[in-house]
Image: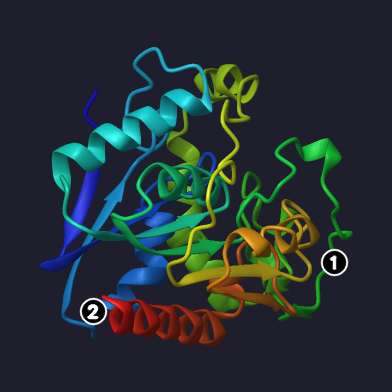
Amino acid sequence: MPLHFVAHGEGIPVLALHGWTADHRLMTGCLEPIFTGLPGYRRLYPDLPAMGQSPVDGINSSDGIVGAVQTFIDDQIGTTPFLLIGESYGGYLGRAIARARPTQVLGLAMICPIGTVVENADRHLPEHVVLRSEAGVRESLGPDEDFTDLAVVETAAALTAYRRDVAPGLALADIKALERILKKRELTVDPEDGPPYTRPTLIICGRQDAVVGFEDQYVLLPHYPRATFAVLDVAGHNLQIEQPELFDGLIREWLRRVAEES
């Protein structure tokens, strides 16, 4: 099953996996401003099955989605070493791919990833709070916009980024198919079931992330001995648009570490 994707640049492949119900724009929106000024990388942004413009094609589990991503890697990257970036559910999938291809994945970065607790009801989560806001933002929302459901930062800039990078993908998601996949969202094999992943790693969490939290990610650290673990204040599940300067700096530092190891 071919996945819809967009690609930019030439050089070392970088595979970016978006989160649940979003599409590739979640990743292009926050990563392309960084990579545009960094030559030497070929960025690949697929839509995961049942999301964006990729069909579900009978997939009914996270195992099936990982299989589709593995096929995409075989088709678009082959055996070439590559970097892997995953957001939320994409971070969960990324860990599974790093386990399967430990020598091929040069570095792993995770943005607000699902941690060791896959089921939402069992996660350790902070209460949703709004810590930064601007007058008029809430009043400017349309009746169907759900920006405030997750936002910790309610500013015009964050809303603009949300409308550009997040909302379009949500509108395309195949909800019925995702509800079916959700019943088998936990991978059959634990991504950390195996030797530690010893390449440069980055785990960025939002201190106020009420979707995946930050506590269930901390316990991943023994498996990733080269991990920078950052918990950003004034940041929720969309931390890349709520703390863009810190996000930018952390991604660039991770890229530097990967380059030094390559």
For the C terminus, the quadrant is: bottom left
- Vertical arrangement, residue 89 with respect to residue 210, above or below: above
Classify residue 252 as left or right of residue 2: right
Q: Given the current orientation, which residue lies at the most extreme front position?
A: 195
x 40%, y 83%: residue: 252
- From the viewer's side, name the closer residue of 111 and 28: 111
- From the viewer's side, name the closer residue of 154 and 126: 126
Classify residue 59 as left or right of residue 79: right
Quadrant of the rendered image containing residue 188: top right
Classify residue 169 as left or right of residue 146: left
x 48%, y 38%: residue: 171
Q: Nearer the viewer, mark 2 or mark 1?
A: 2
Residue 28 location (% of width, % of height): 34, 62
- From the viewer's side, name the closer residue of 122 and 133: 122
- Colour scheme of the rendered structure: rainbow
Classify residue 190 as left or right of residue 122: left
Numbered circle sitting on residue 36: 2
- Vertical arrangement, residue 194 with respect to residue 222, above or below: above
Q: Residues within 10 Å of mark 2 (few under 14, many from 20)?
A: few
Which numbered disc, 2 or 1, marks the residue that appears first in the sequence? 2
> In the rendered image, which residue does mark 1 sit on?
129
Q: What element does badge 2 sit on?
A: loop
Residue 159 location (% of width, % of height): 57, 68
